[in-house]
Image (cartoon, rainbow, N blue to C red):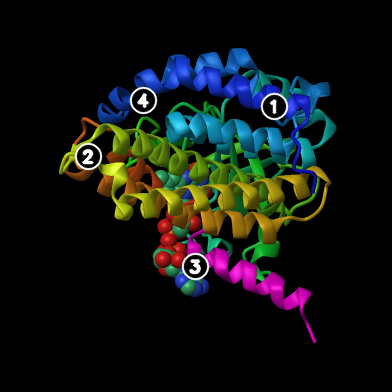
Amino acid sequence: MDFTFTDEQQAAQMMARRFTEKEIIPIADEFDHEDKYPAEVADKMAELGLFGIILPPEYGGMGMDYVSYALVIEEISRGWMSIAGILNSHLMVGYMIANYGTEEQKQKYLPDISSGERRGSLGLTEAEAGSDTASMKSTAKRDGDDYVINGNKMFITNAERGNTFAVLAKTDTQIQPQHRGISAFIVDKETPGFTVGRKIEKLGYKGLRTCELVFEDCRIPKDNLIGDKEGQGLKYVLNGLEVGRINVAARAVGVARAAFEDSIKYAQQRHQFGQPICQFQAIQHKLAEMATGIEAGRLLTLMAADKKNRGERCDLEAGMAKLFTSELSVKASLEGIQIHGGYGYTQEFSVERYLRDACLFPVGEGTSEIQKMVIARRLLEKYKI
Ligand SMILES: Cc1cc2nc3c(=O)[nH]c(=O)nc-3n(C[C@H](O)[C@H](O)[C@H](O)COP(=O)(O)OP(=O)(O)OC[C@H]3O[C@@H](n4cnc5c(N)ncnc54)[C@H](O)[C@@H]3O)c2cc1C
């Protein structure tokens, strides 16, 4: 791995840093506290081309590499991690179409997905099928030239603002193992029989609506099956999740960095016992551990991104990055609150938001327990005797 960033990677990082400082940080606390959708910021990200950042240029995307993507997501999340959430499922939908869609699907959807005209949302999880996605109950039955979808999805990010959904449903409920019966479909929001259900109130990750999806005899053309083969849906999503986990790991590094940067500043300003609290060894140890974790987490994330750039399978590396940075982010934001003392527990400082946001990382996009299973499975393959 080459640790030197290319000119393009550095330019992407600087662009995102400037954007975050100008557009995101000034509004983040207010929008978080009021649980308000950052519509203007999203539109400005569309103007910058970020909705197509990793999508192919021949379909309107920026075609950036995954290291640039990780650097951009880290910067944005240093300001407010919800903003990076707008891009995550959107880009996973774009990724699935770009990599597995038919030529017609690519031409029909990708230019508008890249421009942000279409906003993507991914419907995988169900109320009874979270970590065990293969046990999903939603079905898509072939009926002439259509598929008819029935079922419910749970915890779907961008459901309110998204208009182009990648939805996973079973086209075969009998086949074993169950994942072979799962197919992926593109569903437009306006399709009769499809409704976005209740908004789920959350601890953090404010601004973005997380909702249920309801499908009642929702009829879509057979051409909306992603790719041209049934039973491939979970494979597509799992590959898309490599990109999703690079996003989440970079987000977690961004939140940990925000906690660290706020804390090291505060520790030099806050005086107790006649000196700045950064002079106390107990505070210095916290800062040292936070900064060390951030560097390690970033390297893991970039290692996964670099592997993805080379077109190699990176579920092991993305899983490790996601696992490590998720736990790091929670720990760093908790330490951030501790360094801020009583003020850290108030809404006058941002560290309480960082903690509320960080708590999503070990849960969303595959829990830490599931990451450990994925990592161990791959290690056992690699070190098989
Ligand atoms: C804010 C938010 C946004 C989300 N956005 C989306 C989205 O856009 N699209 C989407 O499809 N989903 C989304 N999700 C769903 C998310 O991916 C799931 O919540 C996650 O995969 C866990 O599923 P679950 O909540 O059902 O937990 P469960 O699977 O019920 O897990 C509960 C606990 O049991 C543990 N556990 C489960 N199985 C095992 C096992 N085999 N071994 C050891 N421990 C185990 C888990 O690690 C966890 O600690 C979102 C979730 C949240 C909270």
Who comes first in sequence, dot 3 or dot 4? 4
Q: Amino acid at mark 1?
A: Gln
Does residue 145 appear left or right of residue 355 in this picture?
Answer: right
Q: Which mark is residue 208?
A: none
Mark-to-mark CA distance, 3 and 2: 43 Å
Cβ of mark 3 under 8 Å from ligand 1: the answer is yes
Who comes first in sequence, dot 1 or dot 3? 1
Disc 4 residue crowd, few under 14, some 14–19, many 20+, Cα 10 Å: many
Q: Where is residue 203? Give x, y as percent.
A: 29, 45
Q: Are marks 4 and 2 in contact (CB under 8 Å)?
A: no
Q: Are marks 3 and 2 in contact (CB under 8 Å)?
A: no
Label 2 sits on residue: 275
Disc 2 residue crowd, few under 14, some 14–19, many 20+, Cα 10 Å: few
Q: Which mark is residue 369?
A: 3
Total numbered labels placed on residues in the image: 4
Q: Nearer the viewer, residue 363 or 328?
A: 328
Mark-to-mark CA distance, 4 and 1: 25 Å
